[in-house]
Image (cartoon, rainbow, N blue to C red):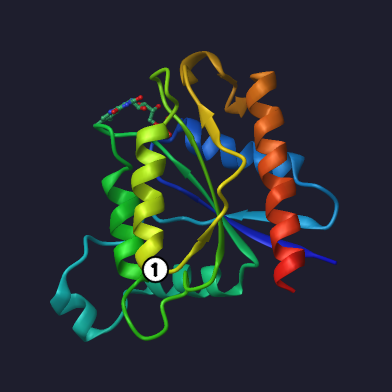
Amino acid sequence: MSINVLGISGSLRAASHNTATLRTAQEMAPDGMAVTIADISAIPLYKEEVFQAGFPAAVTKLRDQIRAADAVLIATPEYNFSFSGVLKNAIDWVSRPPSQPFDGKIIGIVGASGGRLGTARAQYQLRQVFVFLNGQVLNKPEVMIGGANSAFQDGKLTDAAAIKSLGDMLAALATAVEKQR
Ligand SMILES: Cc1cc2nc3c(=O)[nH]c(=O)nc-3n(C[C@H](O)[C@H](O)[C@H](O)COP(=O)(O)O)c2cc1C
């Protein structure tokens, strides 16, 4: 049975630890699971008049990718005790009618930050957003990668405990998708 996971990074930084986390997830995905990483860098700032004129191509693409995915894996940085503005902007665009694609979607949240709490505060705020959007965010495992500057090398996650948690997340996503089917 094949499982298609869409990774979304909340950081546009070239050397982003969160994007690196998704690349590591791509490499360690279990048999039968494929992780694709979305590109949210071309999504404009939300503006109602632009929405009224029609979804920008980058938004349509992301909406289609989310709809086509069995599950979404979000890797969020923590900015000022919350998740990033670019991630919120992407979610806001995607959420506009008709038929917002997070409804009922299985979602895993992970995050890497420089601080000791490893995006814990950002993750809880992100969960709140998905309450409104009716996303099925997994409660466990929690993957909070603190001290990110020493948890990655050459663009890959190298911290053993974090790699184990990320593997647990991928396994939990697979289980949730199989249950939903
Ligand atoms: C505007 C801004 C605010 C930040 N606020 C926090 C914070 O509240 N907590 C934290 O642990 N790190 C904070 N950081 C540090 C980020 O966690 C760190 O830059 C992280 O590497 C960003 O994710 P990325 O590597 O995926 O780009 C902040 C960074 C920026 C740019």
User: What type is the residue that disc 1 sits on?
Assistant: Leu
Q: Quadrant of the N terminus?
A: bottom right
Say if 4 sits above or below 110 in the image. below
Which is nearer the eye, 146 or 90?
Answer: 146
Where is residue 122, by image quadrant?
Answer: top left
**Residue depicted at 41% across the width and 32% down the height:** 119
**Residue depicted at 41% across the width and 51% down the height:** 127
Among all residues in the image, which is located at the extreme top? 150
Please say whether residue 27 is visible from this viewpoint.
Answer: yes
Name the element at disc 1.
loop
Which is nearer the eye, 11 or 102?
Answer: 102
Q: Residue 79, image x and y in percent?
A: 28, 34
Where is residue 155, by image quadrant?
Answer: top right
- Mark 1 is surrounded, within 10 Å at the Cα level, by few (under 14), some (14 to 19) or many (20 or more) other residues, namely some
**Residue depicted at 33% across the width and 42% down the height:** 83
Q: From the viewer's perspective, is 115 left or right of 136?
A: left
